[in-house]
Amino acid sequence: MLLYDQRYRSITIQIFALFLLMLGAAWLIDNVISNLRLLGRTFSFNFLSQTSGYDINQRPIEYDSTMTHGRAALVGFLNTIILAIMGCALATVLGVLAGVLRLSNNWIISRLVTFYVEIFRNIPTLIWILIFGAVMAESMPAPSAFRGDDATSSMIFDAIAITNRGVYVPAVLFVTDLGYLTLGPVAPSLNWLLVIAVIVASLFANKALITHATRVQNATGIRPKTWWKSILILLVPVGAVFIALGAYLEYPELRGFNFAGGVHLRNSFLAMWLGLGIYTGAFIAEIVRGGILAISKGQTEAAFALGLQPGKTMRLVILPQAMRVIIPPLISQYLNLTKNTSLGLAVGYMDLRSTLGGITINQPGRELEGMLLLMAIYLAISLTISGLMNVYNSRVKLKER
Amino acid sequence: MNKSVFLGTLAATALVAGLAQAQTTLETVKNRGELVCGSNTGQAGFGAPDANGVWQGFDVGFCRALAAAVLSDPNAVTFVPLTSQTRFSALASGEIDVLSRNTTWTFTRDVDLNFTFVGTNYYDGQGFMVNRELGVSSALELDGATVCIETGTTTELNLADYFRVNGMSYEPVPVDTAAEAQQQYLAGACDVYTTDISALASSRAAFAEPGDHVILPEVVSKEPLGPVVRHGDDNWADIVQWTLFALIAAEELGITSANLEELKAGSNNPEINRILGNDGGFGEMLGLDNEWAARAIAAVGNYGELFSTTIGDQTPIGLARGLNAQWTQGGLLYAPPFR
């Protein structure tokens, strides 16, 4: 009756399917529990509070080998986040540029960009990462080549050293130290928090200025000049903070085996950043191109008829409409890039996969717990990105009333 | 219909899983007709395929001896190349029967990971290799150096300890396999390559210019390397353990692959008779036949022969016996009596 009566059929089938699903899950879980018992293993996350015993080269927060596995996992997590943010930024810039340029009327430019897109899109990202890693390690000079009177290599502008161990760039340091903000496990520098706060405030002030200009334009038909005000608002406060805190550049210099001082961008980081950024950029280029082509030619013609220049047509008419086509697939690309950071182990980038999912799993031998935790963290990162981007999407999408 | 198929599959899967678990490792190996041995991904002298794709080496030789003892065929072995990160999962999950891949015997691996280290087939220690051009003569001069290190190994932990204890800093370059470490080291992306001294010697032998690289005198750790099996199947652990002891005892008692046939006919040394199966019925106690040890020795020779043909002085690896000499020669090799 339940199966043949149209009123209940779908409910019956759904309940049955749910039942089967739960049965399957229960069987899997039971299997894990009984197999663990058979091996004499317990299920516990205690290893996170044990001493890790290993060192990590790229440390955004304080860490050494006497700290815990949990702390090592946090370092890896931050490295993953740093790489994901930098990679997404590079991919977006490259992708938007390439996407727009591929539509260019200039034959050479559009063909060059097509070449970039097709080459990078059609070769696996891991291979690009390995290529960039190998190029850095094999063809750049060793730090010893910078030594002595007959040095065969020299630093660019006496500030940037490109070696086979990575690129050393000057670091910004402050004379006045405001100390650190203690936030549980991490302690960001108050100096940098202040700089970021000032930049954010400047951006808001600039936005207010532009809103005001638009209002004046709507009321009077004449748009007040804003460019010099924008530059002042964006640059002066930040500059003032840097001067007040006594910012100076610390240049890398050769000391012992390696360069010391400055910021060390390791081979592993550069290989991952370039590999992921340029690879994903090729996909984003296609998404942007598709988004622009989705806007009917009538829009461009209408804008030209109103006397708008091509640049303004793109910025004011085409791109705002293209955004609602571009954003949803763009979210997927950001998620892809973030998950692809887990390829870091291939070049020894110490991300979450290499610390928690690699060494930490291996040293205390907690594969199941480590993998579950790893999955949960990647899931949380991905859902966060997806959620944030969906908020943005709902702001730019076509408002239907 | 669908339901019954699903439940039937479920029941069958559970049954198969149950059956698989009920088998001992020895039965599994015998039914398969093949030993599955976890090996290095490629470490010249210890475990690497030769030009014909046949696995050769010191650790590989042990697996061949074991296969000869259990299955009467030294070639009935499948070698599964494992990185330092994947080896323990492979063993715990039953993917391999025995792990013979320069694995250090430590407390947590033995106790917490639920493995059984059956013995030590190579007493090693961690060392450092640098390019001669650097002019470094001691590991204590390595402050600030960039160090290539295989992740997921005990050497990684020893390295951190050694530099911390001596108040030196270093920049680790983590790599996944020995081959990758060698590539980075030769490219100059790291100043120092650190791992077990035996593996350093093996790597150096494969370099284009071995003479350009020095292994520093410091030995910073104890690394007893040996075959590993899972906890819980003591009979299998005994077979693996006594196969190792048989090879060691054979050297001590002067049984070689050359005089094996002669001694098998009978000897006036009762211990040789017991090892070679003329007396005592030891093979049957293990669940094998009495010729097991004779076959193992016939396959790869005794410990000393295996050592000298794979990693000894006469080979490109050129390792001295050192700690790995018999206890009668001032080394640490000491097989319990066959009695």
Image (cartoon, coloured by chain):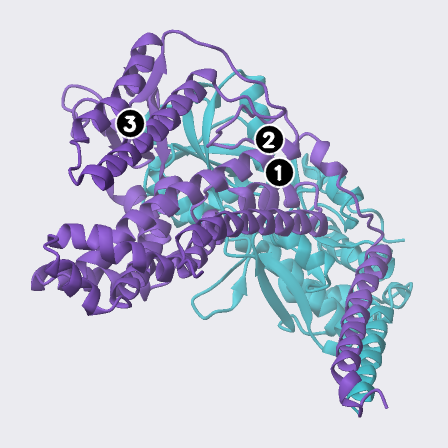
Chain colours: A purple, B cyan
Q: Is residue A252 left or right of residue B151?
A: left
User: Disc 1 vs disc 2: Cβ atoms closer than 8 Å?
Assistant: yes
**Image mark 3: chain:** A
> Which residue appears at 54% of the width and 64% of the height?
B55
> Which residue appears at 64% of the width and 45% of the height?
A362
- Location of residue A55 with respect to B78 vertically, above or below: above
Q: Residue B49 at what x, y percent from top left?
A: 49, 63
The residue carrying mark 1 is B154
Q: CA distance from mark 1 to mark 2?
A: 6 Å
Q: Nearer the viewer, residue A73 or B303?
A: A73
- Residue B260 visible in rendering: no
Q: Nearer the viewer, residue A93 or B102?
A: A93
Q: Residue B159 at what x, y percent from top left?
A: 55, 30
- Location of residue B23 with respect to A302 vertically, above or below: below
Identified by mark 2, the residue type is: Asn
User: Image quadrant for the N terminus of chain B?
Assistant: bottom right
Q: Which labelled disc corresponds to residue A169?
A: 3
Identified by mark 3, the residue type is: Val
